Image (cartoon, rainbow, N blue to C red):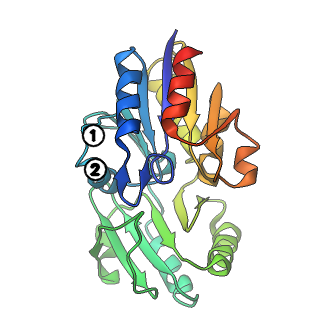
Amino acid sequence: MKKLMAFDLDGTLVFKRAIEAANIDAIRRWQEAGNLAVCSTGKSIFATRMTLADYDLQFDYNVLYTGAVITDGAGKILHQSSLPPTLVNQVVDHLAGLEQVAVFATTLDDDYQLLDTIGQVSNILPAFSPLDLNQLDQNVFVGIPIWSPLAQTRKAAYQWIVETYGDVVDCHRNQDFLDIVPKNSTKGSGLEWLGNEYLGGEPLQTFTIGDSWNDLEMHRWADVSASFSYSPTEVQAETDYVVEKTYDFIDKALSL
């Protein structure tokens, strides 16, 4: 049976904007064995392209924006969802009152910054363009990444988003980021769509590897899952394996 492995990026393959050569070599071995490698990330099309630009690494498929958009390996969009157009402005207005927060908005083409009270650039989302709030209605947004180094700011923002917009959006936690995406968008739902709708239910043995809370739904989808020794304890508790390196899990999966 063909195997499929879904890989988170930040905290799984990408550390300080770099990908370890041993992980690239292991993914290549995985694909050369006839298996599918899927990038499964909260990043946008633009941010994922920037992250992988310097590496000889091409995934077979990409589940992006935490499941809101799926593309093939060349970047052709296979499936997409979008956010309510008035939501972005309302989020910026409210979060401007919180301490140390940056708000971004992502389209199918670009990443924009709408608010910054931190004054730094995140390693996870290092490249973006400014966007005037008066131009919001000229764009179709897929995601709203929110960054704060303060746990209390992230907690307050998450609670407000879920209580206010929980019926129309999902909000996913990832280390220092929150990601607002269209309702019913998770890494798990994106992988399920890819397998059932696009690949036509082809029999696959499925594997996932990811470090954080926003990976939980894809871990629940998989036949076999892995997190890391540095993952939150509740993430470790829901995976079949806890490993040190991504290539450790790839080697293990090749033998299963």
- Nearer to us of marks 1 and 2 is 2
Q: CA distance from mark 1 to mark 2?
A: 9 Å
Drawn side of residue 46 relative to residue 141, left or right:
left
Horizontally, is 204 left or right of 232 in the view? left
Q: Are marks 1 and 2 in contact (CB under 8 Å)?
A: yes
Question: Mark 1 or mark 2: which comes first in sequence?
Answer: 2
Q: Which residue appears at 48% of the width and 34% of the height?
A: 247
- The secondary structure type at the circle numbered 2 is helix
Can you see residue 193? no
Place of residue 61 in the rendered image (x, y in percent of width and height, measured from the top left): 37, 33
Of 201 and 86, the residue lying toward us: 201
Extreme residue in the top direction = 1
Q: Find disc 1 in the rendering and name its residue.
A: 75
Within the image, what quadrant is residue 21 found in? top left
- Which amino acid type corresponds to the residue marked 2 in the rendered image? Arg
Q: Nearer the viewer, residue 197 or 157?
A: 157
- Between 38 and 164, which is closer to the camera in this rendering? 38
Instruction: Give the residue number, with chain letter if any, for mark 2.
Output: 49
